[in-house]
Amino acid sequence: MRPTIQFVLDSADPHELAAWWAETLGWEVEPTDEAFIRQMIADGHATEADTRVFRGALVWREMGVVREPDGPGRMLFQLVPEPKAGKNRMHLDLHFGDEIRDRLVGRGATFLYTETQGPFSWHTLADPEGNEFCIT
């Protein structure tokens, strides 16, 4: 059996970052099941402190998820207490074309640098929480 892959990013605000990446990728924020969350609280498996309201919906406080609308792609954003420290050891490469760079910067990404290797070039940016990614 071939595994499926889910990318997980640490985050200070998983729901805001998930919403940013959903818009960036043209994906969707995975909806939560408010009835299930309320049942978990009622049954004592969770508490109100494990939840928050984000854009009018009850969600699990510690994670947000985005998914590819018609595919297997999925990214999970998990709450961590510490800020990002240092360079990412792994990053996403996104094939958009150069024209998206300024739009992403306008939405909160930070342009870091442009690299070239032979006939290839790419731009390295950071999302609003500092996670590096490259676009070509």
Image (tube, rainbow, N blue to C red):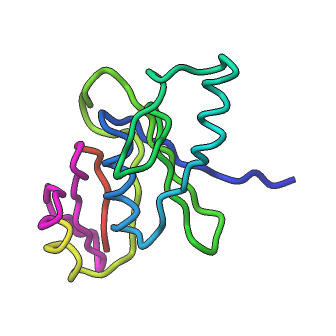
Give the magenta part as a residue range. 105-129
Tell me where residue 83 appears, x and y as whole percent: 25, 27
Q: Is residue 50 above or below residue 96?
A: above
Residue reaching furthest front? Answer: 42
Tell me where residue 108 appears, x and y as whole percent: 16, 57
Q: Is residue 131 above or below residue 119?
A: above
Residue 37 or residue 127, whichever sits in front: 37
Quadrant where the C terminus is found in the figure = bottom left
Residue 114 or residue 94, whichever sits in front: 94
Tell me where residue 32 appears, x and y as whole percent: 56, 49
Residue 61, by quadrant, is top left
Q: Along the horizontal axis of the image, is 50 left or right of 106?
A: right
Q: Is residue 94 above or below residue 10?
A: below
Q: Give the main secondary structure, helix, strand or loop, of the magenta stretch.
A: strand
Q: Along the horizontal axis of the image, is 90 left or right of 102?
A: right
Q: What residue is drawn where x is 64% and y is 70%?
A: 71
Q: What residue is drawn where x is 40% and y is 30%?
A: 79
